[in-house]
Amino acid sequence: MISQISQSDCTKGFSETITEVPQHHETQITEIYPEHEYPLEFYFKFKSDVINNVDYASIKVGDTALCGCGTAPKMLFTMPKQNQDIDIHIEPELLKKIFGIQEDAIPELLKHLFRQPDEEYSVCTGTITTQMQVVLQQIWQCPFEGLIKKVYLEAKVLELMALRLQQYMTREIIQCHEYEPKRTVAEQIYQAKEILETRLNNPPSLIELAEEVGLSLYQLKHKFRKVFGNSVFQYLHQYRMEQARLMLYDGNMLVADVANSVGYSHLGQFSAAFKRMFGISPRDCLKGKI
C-alpha cells in the first residue's frame, strides 16, 4: 500500500501532494484526465521505476516540470510501482502575490506561464539540482508533527518553487517545449481552403495538398466536399472565377494579366471558363457589362 500521501490545502488556491510508494508496492494506478483548465504546477520526480506515460512530455527520475496555467490536454497518467515525488499546484493569482509579480510587469520569461483558460498550457522540464535534492530530502524527513510540521512543509514547498523559478529564469533547463494539440479535421480542411486561395496561380495537386495539411487523400476529398459542398477542384475553379470577375470589374488589369493571376496560362481556356460561369466574356466584363 501507499505509505504516505499528504495533501495540504495550506492556502486557498495552493496545494501540495507528497507521494511515496514503497518498492514492495505491486499495483500501478492509472488515471485518464480529460481536457481541463489547469493551474500552475511545480513537479519533482525523485524516485521511480518507470517513466510517467503522458503524451506531452516524458518525466524521468531526477526531472522537474514547470507547467503554466491554461488548458491541459487529455492525458493518461500511470503511477509506477515505486514512486516518490512532490506535485505542487497553485493558482496564478496567488503565485503572483507570493512572489510580488505585478500584473502589468510580468517578466518576459514568465509571460507564457500565465495564459488564458482557452489557451494551451506550456510545459518545461529540467533537472533537479543539488539544492532541490536537499529540500526534497528535508520534506520527506520532516522531524516535526502537527502545526509545526504544516508550517515547515509549506516553507519548504515555497523554497522548492523559488529554486525552480530561479532555474527557469536563468535558463538552466535541459528541455523546454510546449504541448501541441492535435488539430481537428475541420481545421485541416480550412487550412487546405486557405492554401488554395493563396496559391491560385500555382495550386498544389490533391496529393500534395493532402500531405501539406496532414490528411489522407480520401479524407481531404470526402471532408472537403462535406464542409464546402463542392469538390476541391470545383471550389478552386469557382474561387478563381470569382476573383477574376472582381479584378476585371475593377478595370485596372488587362484580361491576360487577370488570367495569369488566377492560374490560367492559356487565354482562350480562361475566356471559355469565364463565359461558362457568368454567361459573358472577360472582355465584356472589363467593359462593365456585368
Image: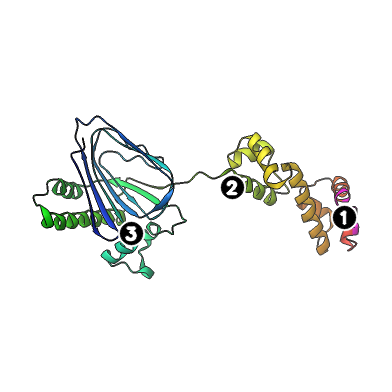
Residue at x-position 28% and y-position 61%:
12
Q: Give whichever of discs 3 and 1 has the lower sequence position.
A: 3
Distance of label 2 from label 1 (alpha carbons): 35 Å
Residue 138 in percent (x, y) is at: 13, 49
Q: Are dots 2 and 1 in contact, CB under 8 Å?
A: no
Residue under label 1, please give it.
282
Residue 117 in percent (x, y) is at: 44, 57
Q: How is the protein colored in the picture?
A: rainbow
Distance of label 3 from label 2 (alpha carbons): 31 Å
Q: Give whichever of discs 3 and 2 has the lower sequence position.
A: 3
- Quadrant of residue 153 within the rendered picture: bottom left
The amino acid type of the residue labelled 1 equals Pro
The secondary structure type at the circle numbered 2 is helix
Residue at x-position 33% and y-position 64%:
93
The amino acid type of the residue labelled 3 equals Glu
Q: Nearer the viewer, residue 174 or 22?
A: 22
Q: How crowded is mark 3: few (under 14 residues within 10 Å), some or many (20 or more)?
A: some
Residue 204 against residue 111 in the figure, above or below: above
- Quadrant of residue 205 within the rendered picture: top right
Residue at x-position 26% and y-position 64%:
98
The mark lying in front, picked from 3 and 1, is 3
Residue 48 in percent (x, y) is at: 25, 36
- Res. 77 mark: none
The secondary structure type at the circle numbered 1 is helix
- Res. 187 mark: 2
Residue 65 in percent (x, y) is at: 31, 47
Q: Are dots 3 and 1 in contact, CB under 8 Å?
A: no
| Residue 19 located within the stretch drawn in magenta | no
- Res. 91 mark: 3
Query: Magenta segment range?
Result: 275-284
